[in-house]
């Protein structure tokens, strides 16, 4: 979940709490920048996606000048935030716009080289993993800065159903090694996850 910064004001405050009517009033004044960034480079839309305020996400997606692929200081996009938090309905909205990149380019990675799929797999969000896997062009073998893939994170954390979803993709490489030489199987075995092994 996105943490509440001490210096939050105005538009960010009402977005954080999902108060759609007030957001509409603020945006109607034309004095509020709908794509502004806070001290961590997070936009109001990113806050809405991370906080699972579906109606607020819809509102911002309707604004043409809003950058849906904006990144915060950690390199996270709104898709990364929604995926990491398991917000399936928000992911559906974002993917339906066809404006959001789901991990098709190297630039879709955050500062630790993690993709939305990697975050969803790490946290065991099956429905989100399934949605992202259905998105054409998603790299199922994307490696983070430590060389771990979505499959290795799911295996390490004993998310058996996520492992099954990833293994159902014929192009997934089950033997990719991370920087310490670990594979998805070795991560599962090292953590005693017999169901995954």
Image (cartoon, grey):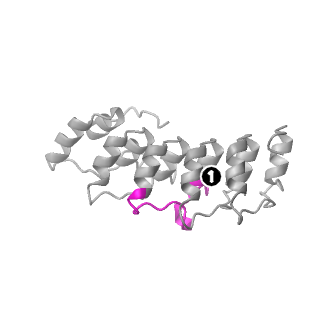
Q: Main secondary structure of the magenta part?
A: loop
**Magenta includes 101?**
yes
Estimate the x, y position of residue 78 in percent, counting from the top left.
44, 50
Q: Nearer the viewer, residue 100 or 172?
A: 172
Mark 1, residue position: 118
Residue 188, given in percent of the width and then of the height, sits at: 81, 44
Taking depth in this image into account, of 81 and 38 the one nearest to the observer is 81
For the point 62% across and 41% down, which residue is it? 123
Q: Position of residue 157 (x, y in %)?
A: 72, 40
Image quarter of residue 167 = bottom right
Please, is residue 64 above or below residue 44 in the view? below
Q: Is residue 189 above or below residue 136?
A: above
Label 1: state its secondary structure: helix
Residue drawn 44% across and 42% down? Answer: 50
Instruction: Please tell me which residue is depicted at 42% across the width and 39% down the height of the picture.
Output: 52
Rendering quarter of residue 177? bottom right
């Amino acid at each position: 979940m996105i943490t509440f910064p001490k210096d939050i004001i105005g538009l960010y405050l009402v977005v954080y709490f999902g108060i759609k009517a007030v957001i509409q009033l603020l945006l109607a004044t034309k004095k509020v920048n709908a794509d502004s960034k806070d001290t961590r480079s997070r936009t109001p839309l990113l806050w809405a996606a991370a906080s699972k305020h579906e109606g607020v996400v819809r509102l911002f997606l309707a604004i043409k000048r809003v950058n849906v692929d904006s990144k915060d200081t950690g390199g996270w996009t709104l898709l990364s935030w929604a995926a990491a938090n398991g917000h399936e309905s928000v992911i559906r909205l974002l993917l339906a716009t066809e404006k959001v990149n789901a991990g098709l380019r190297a630039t879709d990675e955050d500062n630790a080289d993690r993709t939305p799929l990697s975050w969803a797999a790490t946290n065991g969000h099956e429905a989100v993993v399934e949605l992202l896997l259905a998105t054409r062009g998603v790299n199922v073998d994307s490696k983070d800065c430590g060389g771990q893939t979505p499959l290795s994170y799911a295996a390490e954390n004993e998310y058996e159903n996520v492992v099954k979803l990833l293994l159902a993709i014929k192009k997934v490489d089950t033997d990719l090694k991370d920087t310490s030489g670990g594979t998805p199987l070795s991560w599962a075995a090292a953590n005693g996850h017999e169901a995954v092994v």
